[in-house]
């Protein structure tokens, strides 16, 4: 039984890489944010707006404990998931955790292209965004770095680049 768990900052490509890896390996893919949204019948942005971040983190904790019990799956976590409660220790117990590591510049590029609304980034100008990402990533890096594996991600803006990341990941995990 294998369970592959992808962590990393917003915009690191967890969902993109997770979906592509699922397509190649045939392992089922779960995105924790989507799982929360379908269970709560609300978007993450709505949950933040109506209930606040603390309530979201509790839901995220509870639903992580459901999804990370599924077998032979690929799970992409939210960017904040490893940084709350004992989630990172739990993830390391549950499977092969991979940190998708990217520079603030790469994350910034990905996030500018993104269509999904991220409540933590809402209303920030481009200048504020790069400063925020740089500082926030520093705070979070020590959690991400507890992952057993690290995959350096290039800018995932083309099919070939995504395939290269997936191939590296498959070799690294032997799947
Ligand atoms: C968050 C990241 C988001 C989502 C929520 C909070 C974070 O997921 O869980 O907006 O704290 O970094 P993505 O990393 O998939 O954007």
Image (cartoon, rainbow, N blue to C red):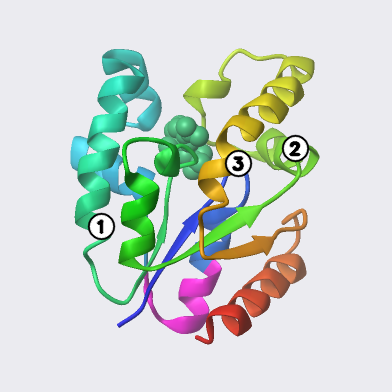
Nearer the observer: mark 3 or 2; the answer is 3
Q: Which of 72/137 is in front?
A: 137
Q: Is residue 129 above or below residue 43?
A: above
The answer to which image quadrant residue 45 occupies is top left
Q: Earlier in the sequence, mark 3 or mark 2?
A: 2
* Measured Cα–Cα span from mark 3 to mark 2: 12 Å
Q: Which residues are magenta?
A: 20-28
* Distance from Cα at disc 1 to Cα at disc 3: 24 Å
Looking at the image, can residue 9 be seen?
no
Label 2 or label 1, whichever comes before in sequence order: 1
Q: Which residue is mark 1?
A: 67
Q: Is disc 1 placed on a helix, strand or loop?
A: helix
Above or below residue 16? Residue 174 is below
Place residue 5 in its image quadrant: bottom left
Q: Secondary structure at mark 2?
A: helix
Q: Is residue 88 visible?
A: yes
Q: Which mark is residue 104?
A: 2
Residue 167, horizontal then vertical, whole percent: 65, 79
Residue on which disc 3 sits: 141
Residue drawn at 37 percent across, 68 percent down: 95
Q: Main secondary structure of the magenta part?
A: helix
């Amino acid at each position: 039984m294998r369970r592959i768990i992808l962590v990393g900052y917003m915009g690191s490509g967890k969902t993109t890489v997770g979906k592509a890896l699922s397509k190649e390996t045939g392992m089922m893919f779960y995105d924790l944010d989507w799982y929360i949204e379908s269970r709560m019948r609300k978007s993450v942005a709505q949950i933040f707006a109506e209930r606040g971040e603390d309530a979201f983190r509790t839901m995220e904790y509870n639903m992580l404990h459901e999804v990370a019990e599924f077998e032979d799956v690929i799970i992409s976590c939210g960017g904040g998931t490893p940084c709350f409660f004992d989630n990172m220790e739990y993830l390391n117990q549950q499977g092969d955790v991979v940190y998708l590591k990217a520079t603030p510049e790469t994350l910034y590029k990905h996030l500018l292209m993104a269509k999904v609304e991220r409540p933590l980034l809402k209303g920030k100008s481009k200048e504020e965004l790069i400063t925020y990402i740089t500082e926030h990533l520093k705070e979070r890096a020590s959690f991400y770095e507890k992952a057993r594996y690290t995959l350096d991600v290039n800018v995932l803006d083309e099919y070939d680049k995504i395939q290269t990341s997936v191939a590296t990941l498959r070799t690294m995990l032997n799947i």
